[in-house]
Image (cartoon, rainbow, N blue to C red):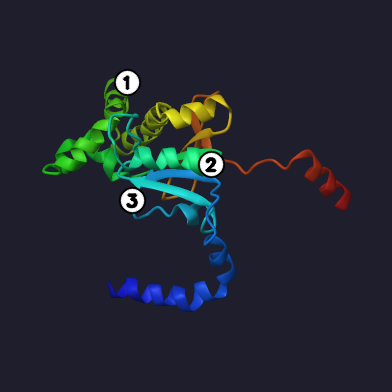
Amino acid sequence: MQRLVEGLHKFQRGVFNNRKNLYQKLVNGQNPLALFITCSDSRIDPNLLTQTEPGELFVMRNAGNIVPPYGALHGGEAATIEYAVSILKVRDIVICGHSHCGAMTGLMNPECINGCSAVNAFLAHAEATRRIVSENYTHITDPTARLMVTVEENVLVQLENLRTHPAVAAAMARNEVHLHGWVYKFETGQIFSYDPEQGQFLPLMPPEPDVAEAKIAAVGN
């Protein structure tokens, strides 16, 4: 706890005082770029990962970056999603899984979370993930590779669950919100994004400069 308190004082004396204008603007409200759904794992920092400022990401976190289907659980997840889409008008929703996920380990190996009744109940919203991996990936026996497949399939399952939320479905029908499936690898810092056309997760590359930027660069050279 002392480490946390010392960090608070450091923030107030240094970061906050040096960026008062930014924090004063945040008093007037928020206009986030995206809803970022990820795991509660302490090794993930969404703002650090995406290099975004306070106010630019609306973040939802839980064990296993799970999105319960609409109506299955009247909890914070449904409220957060609805608020982000209907009130904040986010244009993008990212579901970001990660390597070495403890929740996905527990999903595939229930003995790892014996006695954790609440965790088991929550992971039931990833039962489709468990069935997909158990029945369709019997050829993958290496534990590390099998866990990564579970992480990837879970992102896809949770994207499907996300589509059951009325606010999301309505916004998608108007082409006002776009869904993205990501997987973050701790050991390399890479982000892999699901490509529906190729049916696999591919390294997320920087966007190509648009035509106008390319012309300006060419003139400058």
Furthest toward the left, the residue is: 115
Residue position for label 3: 41
Distance (Cα) linking label 1 and label 2: 35 Å
Distance (Cα) linking label 3 and label 2: 24 Å
Residue 188 vertical placement versus 134 (above, below):
below
Residue 185 vertical placement versus 169 (above, below):
below
CB within 8 Å, label 3 to label 2: no
- Label 1: element kind: helix
Which numbered disc flags the more N-terminal residue, 1 or 3?
Answer: 3
The x, y position of residue 98, in whole percent, is: 39, 43
* Kind of residue sitting beneath label 2: Val
Furthest toward the top, the residue is: 135
Tell me if I can see residue 136 in this picture.
yes
CB within 8 Å, label 1 to label 3: no
Which numbered mark, 1 or 2, is in the foreground of this view?
2
* Kind of residue sitting beneath label 3: Asp
- Label 2: element kind: loop
Residue position for label 1: 136
The x, y position of residue 92, in whole percent, is: 53, 39
Which numbered mark, 1 or 3, is in the foreground of this view?
3
Residue position for label 2: 90
Which numbered disc flags the more N-terminal residue, 1 or 2?
Answer: 2
Which numbered mark, 3 or 2, is in the foreground of this view?
2
Quadrant of residue 122 in the image?
top left
Q: Residues within 10 Å of mark 1 (few under 14, many from 20)?
A: few
Q: Which mark is residue 162?
A: none
